[in-house]
Amino acid sequence: MNPFDDPEASYVVLVNEEGQFSLWPEFAGIPDGWRIARPAAARTTCIEFINENWTDMRPASLVRESETTAS
């Protein structure tokens, strides 16, 4: 089974400097450029966290650029 799909596994939510989120198996090492945004929890809890907090799918750099261009 793919470790990203295991409903019984424990997961963390990662976020990068662009504000992009990722569901990540707790046992796996955190990749460079990412940090933990939500500590270990059930898969459904982590997905709910992502859905509530990642409301703008655009990378943060694009959001900043859009705001600068609009001014």
Image (cartoon, helix red, strand yellow):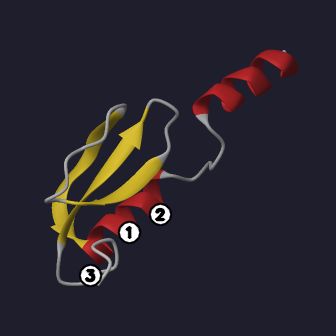
The residue wearing badge 2 is 51
The correct choice, above or below, for 38 with respect to 66 in the image is below
Position of the C terminus, as image quadrant, is: top right
Q: Nearer the viewer, residue 9 or 50?
A: 9
Q: Nearer the viewer, residue 36 or 3?
A: 3
Residue 48 tag number: 1
Q: Tell me the quarter of the picture where residue 2 sits.
A: bottom left
Q: Nearer the viewer, residue 67 or 34?
A: 34
The residue lying at 17 percent from left, 76 percent from top is 9
Task: Give the Cα distance between marks 2 and 1.
Answer: 5 Å
Residue 22, given in percent of the width and then of the height, sits at 40, 54
N-terminal-most mark, 1 or 3: 3
N-terminal-most mark, 3 or 2: 3
* Secondary structure under the numbered disc 3 in the rendered image: loop
Residue that sits furthest to the front in the current view? 1
The residue lying at 42 percent from left, 36 percent from top is 16
The residue lying at 17 percent from left, 59 percent from top is 26
Q: What residue type is labelled 3?
A: Asp
Residue 6 tag number: 3
Q: Tell me the quarter of the picture where residue 8 sits.
A: bottom left
Say whether residue 19 is left or right of residue 43. right
Q: Are marks 3 and 2 in contact (CB under 8 Å)?
A: no
Q: Do the residues labelled 2 and 1 touch (CB within 8 Å)?
A: yes
